């Protein structure tokens, strides 16, 4: 899905990670990925990395990516 979204957005040349490394990243406990699904089809994702929040004594999420296909720009909006 990562490569398909990059192709759709015209940014495939910026993808440096291999599918194997991407899958490996998903096994990390500090990585969180939510997949957006529309009509049963994956259409985007948002990813984050949990890091220590030293001042608060816990963790915080650093959102790293939010990608979706452009057809969702008007998804759910009322017809004009």
Image (cartoon, rainbow, N blue to C red):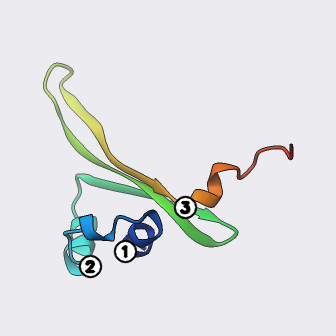
Q: Earlier in the sequence, mark 1 or mark 3?
A: 1
Corner quadrant of residue 59: top left
* Quadrant of the rendering where the C terminus is positioned: top right
Q: Are marks 2 and 3 in contact (CB under 8 Å)?
A: no
Q: Are marks 2 and 1 in contact (CB under 8 Å)?
A: yes
| 47 left or right of 29 in image | right
Q: Nearer the viewer, residue 12 or 34?
A: 12
Report the mark closest to the observer, 2 or 3: 3
Q: Residue at x 70, y 50 (%)?
A: 74
The secondary structure type at the circle numbered 3 is loop
Q: Which residue is mark 2?
A: 19
Is residue 22 placed above or below 75 in the rendered structure?
below
Is residue 62 placed above or below 3 in the rendered structure?
above
Q: Nearer the viewer, residue 7 or 30?
A: 7
Q: Residue at x 59, y 64 (%)?
A: 37
Corner quadrant of residue 9: bottom left
* Quadrant of the rendering where the N terminus is positioned: bottom left
Q: Earlier in the sequence, mark 2 or mark 3?
A: 2
- Residue 75: percent from left, percent from top: 71, 53
Q: Which residue is mark 1?
A: 3
Q: Which residue is mark 3?
A: 69
- Count of numbered circles in the view: 3
The secondary structure type at the circle numbered 2 is helix
- Report, in whole angstroms, how far the alpha carbon at label 2 lies from the one at label 3: 20 Å
- Residue 48: percent from left, percent from top: 31, 48
The secondary structure type at the circle numbered 1 is helix
């Amino acid at each position: 899905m990562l490569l398909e979204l990059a192709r759709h957005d015209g940014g495939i040349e910026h993808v440096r990670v291999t599918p194997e490394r991407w899958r490996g990243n998903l096994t990390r406990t500090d990585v969180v990925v939510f997949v957006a699904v529309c009509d049963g089809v994956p259409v985007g994702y948002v990813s984050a990395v949990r890091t220590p929040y030293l001042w608060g004594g816990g963790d915080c999420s650093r959102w790293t990516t939010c990608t979706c296909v452009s057809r969702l720009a008007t998804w759910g909006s009322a017809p004009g």
